Image (cartoon, rainbow, N blue to C red):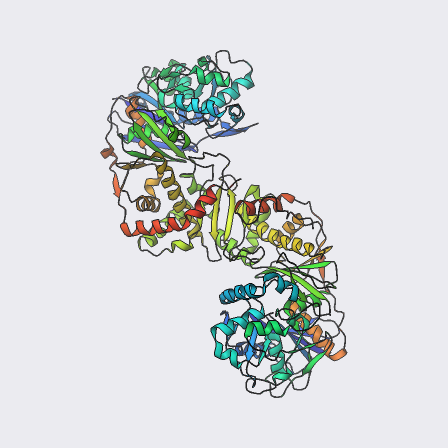
Amino acid sequence: MSATVTVDIGTTGVKLCVFSAEGVLLASDRHRTPTVPDAWGEVYDLPALMSVVESFMMRLPADQRHEIGRIAFTSVGESGGLVRKDLSLASPMILWHDHRGAEHLNALDAAARTNIYRTTGLPANANYGISKTAWAAHRAGSIEDAQWLNIAEYLAAELTGKRWSEWSLASRTMALGLEDRAWSESVTSLFGLPTSVFPELRPATYGATIATRYAIRLGLPEKTSVHVAGHDHMVGAVGAELQPGELLNSTGTTEGLLFLNERPSLEPRFEEAKLANGIASTADYYTLFASIPTGGSAFETLQAMFDLRPDELERVIDELHEDYLDNRIDLSSVPLVVPAFRGSPPPTKDAAARGIVSGIHSRTTTADLVFGTFLGMVLQFADVLELFGVEPSIIKVIGPASRNPLWLQLKADLLNTELSVSQFPEVVSRGAHALANSTHVSWLDTTPRSVMPDHSRHRRLCDWSGHVRKRWEHLKATPR
Amino acid sequence: MTLVAGIDSSTQSCKVSIRDLATGIEVRSGKAAHPAQTIVDPEVWWDALLSAVADAGGLADVAAISVSGQQHTPIFMDRHGLPVSPSPLWNDTGSHPHMVSLNNELGRDEWIRRTGLPLTLSDTVVKLRWLRDTNPVAASHTAAVAVVHDWLTWRLMGYGPGSGGIEALVTDRSEASGTAYWSGDTGEYCMDLFELALGATAYVPRILGPLDRAGLTGPDIPGIPAGIPIGVGSGDNAAAALALGLVEGESVLSLGTSGVVYARSSHPVHDFGGYVCSYADATGDHLPLVATLNAARNFDIGARVLGCSHEELSALALQAPPGAEGLTLLPYFEGERTPDLPHARGSLLDASFENFTRPNFARAIIEGTIASQVYMLEALKSSNVSTDRLILIGGASQSAAVQTILGELVSVPISVPEPDEYVAKGAAMQAAAAIDGGFPTWPVAATDLPATTLYPQIAAQHSAAKVALGYIETGHKEASSV
């Protein structure tokens, strides 16, 4: 194995790590994901992003840099843009939740959407790369040699001069045929695009050598291999040593639910549930995935709303956790929160959906609203998990939720399932390190801790959820 | 200087305001709290009145006195004037099933036709049924029923528990109109409705004219001289309307604990929509009124949740654009009566990471509150009571955000009188009438708000939110045209 720099570009943050050849985390840093507004919304600020990556590496001690053998990029799944062969941009680099290409989906009838699902394993949605590609191609007028690259793939291209797409990220474009693992002409033609607008496919383990000018500038060995490790949640599955039958609960800005399967799940019930199939970063399994748009980002929102510092919010959460364990919370007086603050999860996947807080009364406190938000997030999680029709053998939790005792305990209690929670903070980066080095990691190395459900609390939550179910379903279906 | 005293025996406290007869300027005042319970021994109101009088330094130099009070709340007395039961306040919700029964028995529309009131649990007639059903022995001993202001007036005349003299009880049209056994069309009690509720008849106070004198103060009342005239008195909103010099075409929006909108009208109304209560005023006209349960206390909730003061809440709200970027709050924190949603609670809709900010939340609280009040103006308009000018009063009326947002929601001129105890002032004017036989002309200092740009989307957002939650049907027209 080689010492590895990992770069994980998330919705709100960029996480950078250095691992030793033995897989020990040596250093890490975190920056806000740099974005700038354009005429249609918000796009990546690429010079600023490159600066974040370069400055992290250049701040490493020279002797540490000389040991680097791998650089591995991961990112959110559906962000990207059109990049020409000379690596100039033919479009802005668009964020994953940007729906500027939505109109290119409008012409799709039900049969076409079903065909897309049967081919790509994805429910037609403007999050995925192909509608953005169509938008960019339409704007550019002529594609010429431009190709769609995910933001992680773009950064790898920038460092190597080569364009390619990694399996797990390619499977988030809605242009990749799952069965034959090739770009699907039947799908790209629906958007008026040739398959050549999508680049060569490579597994995460297959990198490219860094361009000499970057090796010199960054003080890295000339043979440093640059990898696209893949889609962050999928790479997290590698870092968590996920096995078929196990559920990965990946908590970042959004919250992901991920199963590994031997075969893609393309039956109508999965299409109706809008669950997303994909190819695992290791390319040996298929993934079945659901994303809940509101995840860890709720923390920042609650902090800002209630004017709390992070430590103050943590204190509120800790106190609520204690009150909850001691049965001191009257669930009937807690507001019911539908936390669709950035759209709804499957089965609706409605980007226009918005959050609702119901049941606020004259004695409602800040703590009630914080508790209600986490309770709503857990109820939402349970709804989404039910769509898979599988009872997981174990739930592996990674990401910021692992530091939130209330969120975890509510989840364990409502599902009446034990959670295995990583205590290692950067499981995605750990997975990227493993992929770039073609090696395996053990879940036990994350020193996971168990969060056990309690039967009486499970009963209480079931009673509560039964009581609010009708209202919950009504609020979820509330038109905007 | 001749002084007169106005007393406001409200839900929360008793206030005494002593004013110069010539100018209406308050020269001193006193106050005493009422208990927080919603079923109380009526003696607490008399004790609080005496404490407030003492707090004001006594009334030895006062030439006349008059009382206004919380509407509806009854005192049940036996033939000796002794209360037979604790009194349920107008806002005691324990009488909800009794309201339902009376509505079922007579029919909702019939109550409106006979009394002008869509029956609510606040109305005196409902409290009669409550007494009959919860304490039949007390009901059987009930020989007279008076509301708080009637009873305090009677106490000032020297009567009291065990004294007898229930025939001396008097009231005015405004109080009678809140009982739901009085007709605004005939100006007479509907004793069949009284009997329907209580199961028996009893003495009800004689209704005096607006300029009548109730009597003279009795002997040996601490702090109050004997033999001074007592004005007719009135219900609280009628007293405030009198003090504000309300004329037809004007509506008052009072943002207190609850929200109230009322207007002066020459005729009673019958709102079969069920929102407008056809009360009488203190001048001989009518005072159609609509109320919300949730008003200024919404701001307490907003301030508590955001961890800020009321001033900061107002400042935060003004940092946000009209419509709060879509964030919409329906402020039914305690259920609501307008619209009729007794079991509803507050809801916040259309929250996103982008708009769920402190300024937007503050604005959503205030917009939701004001939109609910504007909805009441629409209800008045539906009863053919138009508003050409709006007078904003109450504890929250001085908030810059309230004034700004109200201006964004209504097109009529808005006037904000200087803070004053308008209920007590109106009572003091009735005390003056007990001396002079006519109401004094006391000025009301007020500021006219500058006209601002209308933002109809605020009302549209709230209508859409009510549709979304199933509170009203799609297409229901309620956007403000006031």
Does the rendering let one see residue A136?
yes
Height in image: A476 above or below B338? Answer: above
Q: Nearer the viewer, residue B370 or A338?
A: A338
x, y percent for residue B252: 68, 60
Q: Nearer the viewer, residue A32 or A427?
A: A427
The quadrant where residue A447 appears: top left
Q: Nearer the viewer, residue B37 or B340?
A: B340
Q: Residue at x 31, y 31 (%)?
A: A259
Q: Is residue A124 left or right of residue B406?
A: left
Does the rendering let one see residue A173?
no
x, y percent for residue A397: 31, 37
Height in image: B225 above or below A240? Answer: below
x, y percent for residue A95: 47, 28
The quadrant where residue B25 appears: bottom right
Q: Total of numbered circles in the picture?
A: 0
The quadrant of the image that shows the N terminus of chain B is bottom right
x, y percent for residue B424: 65, 71
Q: Is residue A106 left or right of residue A439?
A: right
